[in-house]
Amino acid sequence: MGKSNNKLGSVFTNGIIASNPVLKLVLGTCPTLAVSVSAFGALGMGIAVTFVLVCSNIMISLLRNVIPDKVRIPAFILIIATFVTLLQMLLQKFVPALYDVLGIYLPLIVVNCIILARAEAFASQNPVGDSALDGLGMGLGYTLAVLIMAIIREFLGAGSFFAFDFMGFSYSGEIGNLPDYALNIFTLPAGGFLTFGILIAVVNQISMNNEEKKKNKAKRDAKKIEKAKKDLDKEEVAA
Amino acid sequence: MADNDVKVEAEVKTPSKKKFNKNSIVWCVCILVIIGSVAGALLGAINVVTYVDPDEAIISKITGIYESATDIKKDDSYVINGGAYGSVTSVFTYNVDGDDMLCYYAVGRGAYDGTIELLFFIMKEEGIVDNVSVYSSGETSAVGGKVLKVLDELRGFELPSLKNYGQTNSADAQEMEYYVSGATVTTKGVTNALRACAYAYNNKVEG
């Protein structure tokens, strides 16, 4: 029971940290760079991608034994496109502000390689529960990465923090005189690449440090075990 | 000799049978058709629930901006199109505190993804732009904020003063008072929509 809980936990956290789709696997970079201009848009895109990931993973996992191998890619695309169109209709009707912000990048979720990659690599080979958790973890990992990028770009490029206009509530997010000194390049594609590169470098450095720490700990543990064995041998000889 | 011929034929036929497996092809097609049909039915049902009537959307925009708006009616007699780079799709008449107003739903070509759809709220007697609202656009969110700044500058614009109904080019857009740097293409789309609106107003109301 404990082991299965650990396994489910690792399936969930894998997408958020160890195999973050944006910062570690470098998937779905096109919409990431495009929507990370404002934090509000990035959060909306993250939620949209998470919804489609979870729903398509569940459906593909349910149908994994029925869909023939030869037509699995068209079948996956069909299922993903259905959920994206459904989401598009719901957003247009109930959250038009977010629908306007996401614009062309909303229908483009259909060809987002994160979703197709998880369908092909995980959902088509694993049970429903695991696939749903994998979708949720990957979706949250994507949302986290896009949101961090967007907060940095919005702050440096527009001098604001989480500006939004949503269901009658609006907030300019402008911080003092900062908009007058904003570095416009960060709202442009060049600034997006720059932020993306720096974030990947930081994440890689952190994960390298963690791996080194783990290795050092393993070495220390091995030495301790060896020392304990030697002490035991000496005691036996003395006895 | 005849026996040998039969054997050769059998050898030739066997591999072709393996390659062309009718059952598997039929099964693949059936699965795709079933998934497609279920998806179509689901989306059809959702579409019934989430359908947005364009006229209702415009009326709700009018009542959102003018809370005291009354007598809101669609009047197609105001729809007059002449320019090739912008067009008026529909016009609504309404009354705000005794003043007659017009709402033009105009489409301007030449914007970021091809077109920008705007609602111009016009004071009928004077032909002055009282308000402008975006109905639909393909602008990216970074440009979106700039579009709103452009639209704010259009308030108070007198439609009878506009007589050039041709296409707006980039240089032309930059000469406009409300031009915003970094949104040249958007300004182009907005200007083309404004010209379509002016054409319709000047030919109907101004005579």
Image (cartoon, helix red, strand yellow):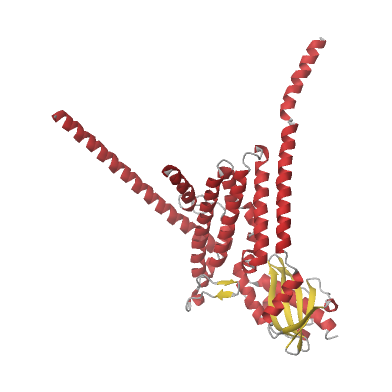
Residue A123 placement (x, y as % from top left): 57, 45
Q: Is residue B175 above or below residue A108?
A: below
Q: Quadrant of the N terminus of chain B?
A: top right
Residue B135 placement (x, y as % from top left): 70, 72
Identify the residue at horizontal 84%, vertical 82% (top origin): B204
Residue B119 or residue B71, whichever sits in front:
B71
Q: Specify the farthest residue to the top.
A: B1
Residue B204 or residue A81, whichever sits in front:
A81
Residue A151 placement (x, y as % from top left): 50, 66
Residue B192 or residue B15, whichever sits in front:
B15
Identify the residue at horizontal 48%, vertical 79% (top origin): A177
Q: Is residue B88 above or below residue B35?
A: below
Task: Examine the image and state in which quarter residue A97 appears.
Answer: bottom right
Q: Is residue A61 visible?
A: yes
Q: Is residue B98 above or below residue B80?
A: below
Q: Is residue B172 visible?
A: no
Identify the residue at horizontal 69%, vertical 64% (top origin): B113
Q: Quadrant of the C terminus of chain B?
A: bottom right
Q: Is residue A108 above or below residue B94?
A: above
